[in-house]
Each structure stands twice: as structure tokens, then as C-alpha cells.
Image (spheres, grey):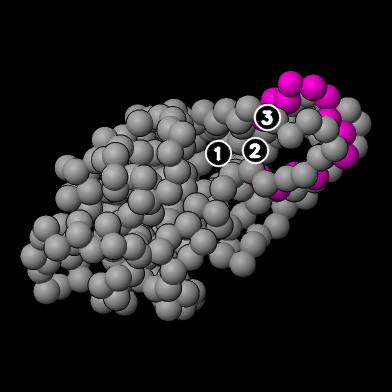
Amino acid sequence: MKVNFSYDFTLTFPESVRDHRYCLRIVPYENAIQTCSNLDIRVNANAAFEQGTDGFANRFVYGTIAKPHKSLSAHIEGELELLPYVYCDEEPPALYNAPSPLVSFCALMQAFLDETTLPVSAFRKAFMLTQKIRDSFTLIESTKAEGLESFLLYKEGLRNDFSHLLIALLRHVNIPARLCHGFIEGENKTHTWVEAWMEGDWRGFDPIKGIVIHDEPYVKLAHGRDFSDCAIYKGSYIGKRQHILKITGQIGREEQQ
């Protein structure tokens, strides 16, 4: 499947900041099922920037804006070739089978698991848990309560919470799992989902929608042990420590001739 994509990143500050060092994970991931072409990246009205990759092979752009400014903006567009969502890579699955900064198992998760008799196969376990999370929790856009224990207590949370819970449960039953961050068709904001390692491949599961990802256009920007490894923006600057982050995106399928 071929798709066109475009998205915009805007970081605004209430007062001017300076000596702003930034890192933006806004470049689509490259792997066996996702390849990118005709890429166009613009940062702050064509300001200079560099490109690199992190330890998870996530691609990013980075740079420094020394002069006072009240916003950081980036626009990216291009074309992607997407294949069915089953693939392997060179990362060791064991990297994703241990607790991570935002994902660790707790007693409330055990109680959640005890409500269900899980199937034997890894795929069926992952699919059942994906659907159970979708059916048990409500997606909200903002919350003051943070972390998986609050998510389990109040039965509502952010996109990251759905993915983090599925990752924690899969790791507990010895299925390596990692978080993916990107865009999906039909939504103009970022989305998260989970890749789980089974039978020699990574498979995609979306606990917000309760589905196994097959050939739907899921555009991955980054993956990691949890969201702390693949947040779109990281940076430092001199100025007031407040900012507003806005990210919008669009995916369109190319018509087949």
C-alpha cells in the first residue's frame, strides 16, 4: 500500500526562550514493512538542522536556535510504502521483556489478569488482552491522574495508558512487547499501539481499537520500551519552563492506477 502523509509540529512558549537545543522524532521509521520516499522536512522557516538515529533506530532531527523565539515549528511530508504488519528486525526481543521506566507489573494488573482465562498460544493471548483492554477502559484526552495504577483504578486514561497496560501484561506472560508512536488513518493526532514478539516476528496490536493490525495504514515514527523512549519532542532551553505542544497529521492512500 502506498500512502501520502503530512504533519505539523508546533511548540509555543508564553515568553521568549533562547539557546534552545531540540530533538524531534518526526521522521517516519524505516524497516521491512515501512519505507519512505520524497521526504520534505522544514524547521522554523527553513532553519538549519541535522538528522540522526537513536539506540532504537528511531530517526530524528535536531538543532539549536540561539536567538530569542516564542515557538518551534516543523513540517514534514512524503510518501510511504506499507506492507502487511508482520516483520522481524535485528533488535533482541529480550530488550522488551523486562520492566521499563513507565511500565512495571503491579497487584492491580494481577487482579485484572485473574478475571480472564488466557489461551495457550502467544498470538491468542495478545489478541484477547488487546480486546479486554479496549472493552474495560475509556479513552480520554487529558487527565491529572498519571500512571498505570490510576488507569486501572479509574478505568479511563490516555492513549499511552492503553498501550502501557498491554505491554505490562504481555511481558508478565513472557511475551516481549514495545510501544509504537505515530499516526493512523482517520485521525489528525498522534496514536500509540503495541508490537509483540511471537513466533519469530513482531506483530501489531492496537488496544484502543481492540484489533490486530494487518494492512491498515499505521505510520510509525518511533518505538521503544515505553513512551519515554519515543516521545516526539525532547529539548532544553533558557527561559520559562512552560510550553504548549500541538501535533497534527494526515494520511491519504494513493489511488491505484
Write the start and end of the magenta stretch as one range: 11-24
Q: Earlier in the sequence, mark 2 or mark 1?
A: 2
Residue corresponding to mark 1: 78
Residue 131 point in image, percent of width and height: 18, 49
Residue 200 point in image, percent of width and height: 31, 77
Quadrant of the image for the C terminus? top left
Camera-side mark, 1 or 3: 3
Q: Residue at x 17, y 42 (%)?
A: 135
Residue 36 point in image, percent of width and height: 53, 49
Residue corresponding to mark 3: 243
Q: Horizontally, is 69 left or right of 82 in the view?
A: right
Name the quadrant containing residue 179. Answer: bottom left
Above or below residue 162? Residue 115 is below
Q: Amino acid at mark 2?
A: Asp
Residue corresponding to mark 2: 40
Q: Secondary structure at mark 3?
A: loop
Residue 5 point in image, percent of width and height: 49, 35
